[in-house]
Amino acid sequence: MNWFMLFVAGLLEIGWAIGLKYTEGFTRLWPSVGTAASMMASVALLGIAIKSLRVGTAYAVWVGIGAVGTAILGMVLLDESVNTGRLVSLGLIVAGVIGLKLATPAGSGAGRGTICSPSADVNDRAAAGHANL
C-alpha cells in the first residue's frame, strides 16, 4: 500500500511541477490554489509512505516519477523539444526507479531500531541503549 501511496505522491508531484507553469508566478488564483494543494498532498503522501519505506529509496522514486512525468508532459503540453538524447535520459531515470524498487528487500522498513521514537516506552529506550532520551 505504501508503494501505491508513493506512486500517487509522484503523480501529484508532476501535477504541481506542471502547475507552476500555469500559475504565471503565482499571479493566477485557481492555478496557484491547485498547484499548492497538489504540493501539499504530494509531500503528505510521501511522508506517509516513508513511515515504512526506506527514505533514500522512497525519495528517489518520488523524484524520479516527478522528473520523468514532468519532462514528458513538458514535451506534450508545452512544446518542449523531443530528441533522442532526452528520451534516452528519461529511460535511464525510469530504469533507475525500477531498479531501486526491485533492489529494495520485501518488507524492508524505515530502519526502525536505529532511532528511538518519542512514543517508545522508557524500557524500550533503555534496552536500545538510549536511556537518556
Image (cartoon, rainbow, N blue to C red):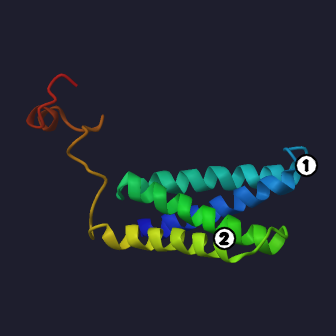
Question: Which residue is at 80% across, 67% downward?
Answer: 80
As shown in the figure, which amino acid type bears the numbered disc 2?
A: Arg
Percent coordinates x, y for residue 82 in the rendering: 75, 74
Query: Is 25 situated above or below 70?
Result: above
Question: Which residue is at 66% across, 51% downward?
Answer: 39
Task: Place residue 76 in its image quadrant.
Answer: bottom right
**2 or 1: mark nearer the eye:** 2
Q: Which residue is mark 1?
A: 28
Distance (Cα) linking label 2 and label 1:
31 Å
Question: Which residue is at 82% across, 71% downward?
Answer: 77
**Label 2: which secondary element:** helix
Task: Place residue 72 in its image quadrant.
Answer: bottom right
- Please state if 111 lies on the left or on the right of 19 as rendered: left
Query: Is 41 situated above or below 75?
Result: above
Decide which of 106, 95 is in the foreground and name it.
Answer: 95
As shown in the figure, which amino acid type bears the numbered disc 1?
A: Arg
**Label 1: which secondary element:** loop
Percent coordinates x, y for residue 24 in the rendering: 88, 49
Q: Which residue is mark 2?
A: 86
Question: Which residue is at 55% across, 58% downward?
Answer: 63
Q: Residues within 10 Å of mark 1 (few under 14, many from 20)?
A: few
Name which of mark 2 and mark 1 comes first in the sequence: 1
Query: Is 17 situated above or below 96?
Result: above
- Please state if 15 lies on the left or on the right of 122 as rendered: right
Q: Residues within 10 Å of mark 2 (few under 14, many from 20)?
A: few
Work out which residue is located at the far front of the displayed protein and give it: 85
